[in-house]
Amino acid sequence: MKSYTITVNGTAYEVTVEETGSVSAPAAAPVAAPKAAPKAAPKAAAPAAGAGAVKVTASVPGKVLKVVASAGQAVKAGDNIVILESMKMEIPVVAPQDGTVASIDVAEGASVENGDTLATMN
């Protein structure tokens, strides 16, 4: 028998492996489940005519940690608009396309639900 120390998330575990003497094909190594990446804001439809044609919405419930963009600011697709805190994680909500921020519809500290409008864009 061989003993090993395995550390997982800072906790050490002693593991003993017993050799059985039989030879068989090695089992597939267990694969750790990947950490779920924060969901990006859903892509909005092509803008219609008029101010604030594209809604930037929350993809998770949480609290507005920081408002990054401001009304009138030009942004590119993928630029941060708002940072949410959800389940002790910072979730960036990004611009779905290039454009101009028409309005910011939330304030820092506000609670939001999935689908709530955070900002509008032209």
Image (tube, rainbow, N blue to C red):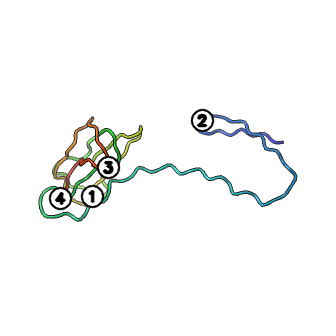
C-alpha span from label 2 to label 1: 40 Å
> Can you tell which mark lies on residue 35?
none
Residue depicted at x 25% and y 60%? 98
Q: Tell me the amino acid under the disc marked 4.
A: Ala
> Residue 60, how many percent across, how many down?
35, 46
Secondary structure beneath dot 4 equals loop
The residue singled out by tag 4 in the image is 53
Q: CA distance from mark 4 to mark 2?
A: 48 Å
In the image, is residue 51 above or below residue 69?
below
Relative to 35, 3 lies left or right: right
Tell me which numbered mark, 2 or 1, is placed earlier along the sequence: 2
In this figure, which residue is indicated by the disc labeled 1? Answer: 76
In the picture, measured across the screen, residue 26 lies left or right of residue 77, that is right
SS for callout 1: loop
Examine the image and state in which quarter residue 15 appears: top right
Residue 93's disc number = 3
- Residue 112 at x, y = what percent? 28, 41
Gap between marks 3 and 2, in whole Å? 31 Å
Q: Residue at x 33, y 40 (%)?
A: 62
Chain-order first, disc 1 or disc 3? 1
**x 84%, y 48%: residue:** 19
Residue type, numbered disc 3: Val
What is the three-letter code of the residue carrying label 1?
Answer: Lys
Q: Reading the chain from its start, which is encountered first: label 4 or label 2?
A: 2
Q: Nearer the viewer, mark 2 or mark 1?
A: 2
